[in-house]
Image (tube, helix red, strand yellow):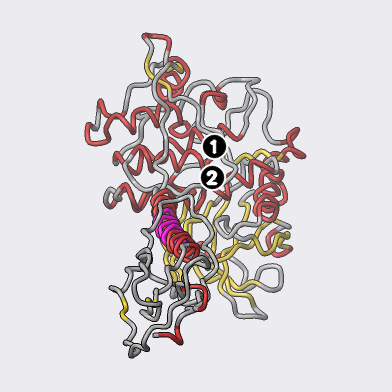
Amino acid sequence: MTAAAKLPAIIASRYLPVRVIGRGGMGVVYEVVHARTGEHLALKLLLAGGAAPIKDLNRFKREARAPGKIKSEHVVHVLDADTAPELDDAPFLVMELLLGHDLEQLAAQSRPSPSLVVEWLRQIAPALDQAHRIGIIHRDLKPENLFLANQEGRPPMLKILDFGIAKITEDDATATGSGQILGTPRYMAPEQATQNSPVTGATDLYALGLVAYRLLAGESYYRGPMMSVLAELLHGVPSPPSARHPELGAGFDAWFLQACHREPQCRFSSASQQIEALAGALGLPGVQRTGEPAPPSPPVLDGASGPTVTDASPVASQRPRSKTRLVAMLAATLALFAGIFAYRAFSAGERTRLATQQAQLPVSPEVDVRHDAPAGLPVEPVPGPASIATPPLVEAAPPIAADARRITPPASAPARVAAPTPRRKSVRGPAPVSPPRSQATPDPYRDQK
């Protein structure tokens, strides 16, 4: 007979039990159907009922309240919390029903690829960062509490479960008792196993490093009975992961020793930064996030004193270089266009300067030598066209009138009457070679040609 069959036909007058999903030390989880809406949900019931110790009741309350404070789709959604009169007022909480497998089940089947591990952990990193910002520390982060939920028409989504032992700042006084150790030893940080040590967001980041190792190596980093694990956690010297699994490489060694550094302040500053550094250590493309501080230097082994921060190069995530290449291409294109524009401007300026010089050159008029002077008198030769002078240019002389070019006898010569001679045709000398004229310069002798 199943546990579901022992339950009443209805819980809290609205939830109908269907089957048992899982059972733990404190409670049992059932699949139920809402009597009014017909929606299938998950209901977690505290086995001890209303007589449960106060610490268990407080833990149950934290598990119900923490997801509502974080408000992330990568944290399981809690829909209801109440007590069941049918079960002696046993407290319960109702969550969304998830279909899929947790990461421990998936890792037991086969080792996922590095790219798949990074893709999974990238999903929950922002949710962890958000929880830490509002003062919520999970304190039990492990593959069993990371559930890969199937979604219709969408890729699977990783969700964080079980905030039962979460530390909430406003409830810090009731989060843990004196001398009580909370968490799973194989995924605990050293400060969790030490009395009076503060638990911060770095505690979850330590567990996140151990989760990554479990997925990539196919085994837990800490193995053996609980007491031996705690002794190794507190007093052992961490060995590089590649000592057991050489395929992980030195880059992952440096990343792991920083993620799981004994001192919380030497770990990464956020889950998002830690996972992007993991992508870089595994040779995978990273996703740049604005406002992220640069990661501190990774730790290396330093004798028997455990991992310490030395001058080793930091584990840097590989940033996409496409943006840099695009900027370089744009700069080269702009430089090319600037060169073309400058060449065209220079050519236009040269043409304008030459046209201006040609417009200022003197134009030699054509000389018409007429032989109508009296016979016997010497005729002074008319000078030919002047040569083109080099700059500086002088302004051309005004043209000579036709009457002024006629040769007249001197006033003292006696006047003689000469027989009229027939007028000869004008003899033109060879056409002077004149420089090219611009279209804007008029020709003063156009009518004599």
Q: Residue at x 57, y 51 (%)?
A: 27
Judged left or right of residue 266, residue 306 is: left
Residue kind at label 2, given as amino acid type:
Gly
Dominant secondary-structure state across the stretch colored magenta: helix
Seen from the viewer's position, the closer of residues 188 and 314 is: 314
Place residue 100 in its image quadrant: bottom left
Query: Is 393 placed above or below 381 here?
Result: above
Report x, y in % for residue 316: 42, 35
Structural distance between the alpha carbons of marks 2 and 1: 23 Å
The residue that appears at 63% across and 52% down in the rendered structure is: 46
Image: magenta residue range: 335-349
Image mark for residue 110: none
- Mark 2–mark 1 contact, CB under 8 Å? no
> What residue is pinned by disc 2?
25
Q: Does 337 lie within the magenta span?
A: yes
Secondary element under disc 2, as helix, strand or loop, is loop
- In the image, 319 versus 306, the foreground residue is 319
Query: Local crowd at mark 1 within 10 Å, few (<14), some, or many (≥20)?
Result: many
- Residue 164: x and y in percent read 62, 45
Residue at mark 1: 204
Kind of residue at badge 1: Asp
Looking at the image, which is closer to me, 108 or 307?
307
Residue most extreme to the top: 304
Question: Looking at the image, which is closer to me, 308 or 5?
Answer: 308
| Residue 390 percent across, percent down from the top left | 41, 51
